């Protein structure tokens, strides 16, 4: 089983739920955790990972570099549609690496072969053994593209563990939104759990996430976080009824949640008696029924 916890919007408690689900299910199942938010990974913080067991560079992009034999003819600048080439105060042509897509057009027109196209580091892949099982995490370098590829690579590693029998199931903490990282996260998954709050903006983002999951024909459930924070608002329930989507849990607002994050612990371990923990334990039993 590969289960993705997603949300159309950030800050709705997705990682809190994911970390606690993993903490509960890993008590008697072999779970691999995938932190698929390569722009802002945080699962390792909740698992109190201080050192990585393995860390490697992820190279998936090319970038251009201007060499010393450049004669400053300007041809490269004219063909770069990404406007990645500029002239510095000294009249020399330079590359803005964060804008360069590595397309190679500049190199093709350079009359003196003064442009080198080489591999560029997009980010880092990291692996840690945690008390909840192996965690694969990733971090995209600032301004670098290909976050989707990085997530695909994370999933490849976790699926490899699964194939070898080192883990039974994979739980993925997706990035917020519906960008390429999220598409990579849900591609090939068995279930998607969408976390949403009872507010119009969260519901609107939840609908977009639901549409994306439906595009991939993935069985999708909803968890309401901060249930009751907006008394009388039934946007999530109405959407669920209209679309036949099951709401598998309603986590109440709980002041223990930010305290658990500060303590770098899954909520169910930091405050197991809290109302939010009790509901997450109930949700974990629903999830366990799928496995
Ligand atoms: S490789 Fe492409 S994007 Fe990069 S500087 Fe050259 S023309 Fe521009
Ligand atoms: S085309 Fe080549 S020689 Fe001309 S400015 Fe660009 S790098 Fe320099």
Image: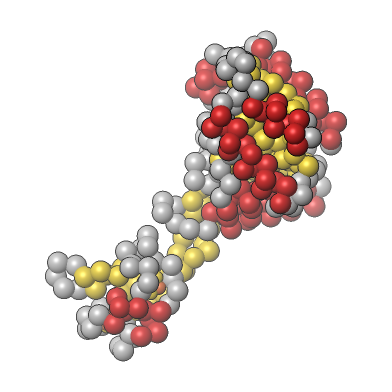
Quadrant in the rendering for residue 19: top right
Figure quarter occupied by ligand 2: bottom left
Instruction: Give above or below for 93 relative to 258.
Output: below
Which of the two residues, 278 or 261, is positioned nearer the viewer here? 278
Q: x%, y% of residue 44?
A: 56, 36
Q: In the image, 108: left or right of 146?
A: left
Q: In the image, 105: left or right of 53?
A: left
Q: x%, y% of residue 216?
A: 73, 52
Q: x%, y% of residue 145?
A: 48, 58
Which of the two residues, 240 or 94, is positioned nearer the viewer here? 240
Q: In the image, 289: left or right of 177?
A: right
Quadrant (top left, top right, bottom left, bottom right) of the N terminus: top right
Instruction: Give above or below for 217 relative to 48.
Output: below
Task: Residue at 40% x, 79% y: name it.
Answer: 105
Task: Residue at 63% x, 56% y: name it.
Answer: 153
Task: Residue at 52% x, 20% y: name it.
Answer: 258
């Amino acid at each position: 089983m590969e289960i993705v916890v997603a949300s159309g919007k950030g800050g709705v408690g997705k990682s809190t739920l994911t970390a606690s689900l993993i903490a509960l299910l890993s008590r008697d199942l072999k779970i691999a955790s995938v932190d698929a938010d390569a722009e802002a990974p945080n699962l390792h913080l909740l698992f109190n990972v201080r050192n990585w067991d393995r860390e490697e560079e992820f190279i998936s992009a090319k970038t251009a570099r201007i060499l010393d034999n450049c004669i400053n003819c300007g041809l490269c600048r004219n063909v770069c549609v990404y406007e990645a080439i500029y002239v510095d105060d000294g009249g020399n042509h330079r590359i803005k690496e964060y804008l360069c897509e590595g397309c190679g057009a500049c190199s093709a027109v350079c009359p003196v072969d003064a442009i080198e196209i080489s591999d560029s580091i997009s980010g880092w892949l990291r692996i840690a053994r945690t008390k909840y099982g192996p965690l694969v995490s990733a971090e995209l370098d600032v301004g670098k593209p290909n976050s989707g590829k990085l997530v695909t690579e994370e999933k490849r590693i976790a699926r490899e563990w699964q194939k070898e029998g080192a883990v039974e199931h994979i739980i993925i903490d997706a990035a917020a939104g519906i960008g390429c990282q999220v598409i990579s996260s849900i591609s090939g998954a068995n279930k998607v759990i969408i976390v949403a709050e009872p507010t119009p903006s969260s519901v609107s983002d939840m609908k977009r996430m639901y549409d994306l999951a439906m595009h991939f024909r993935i069985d999708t459930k909803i968890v309401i976080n901060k249930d009751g924070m907006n008394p009388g608002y039934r946007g999530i329930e109405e959407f669920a009824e209209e679309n036949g989507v099951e709401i598998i849990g309603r986590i109440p607002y709980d002041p223990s949640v930010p305290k658990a994050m500060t303590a770098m612990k899954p909520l169910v371990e930091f405050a197991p008696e809290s109302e939010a923990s009790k509901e997450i334990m109930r949700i974990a039993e629903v999830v366990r029924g799928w496995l």
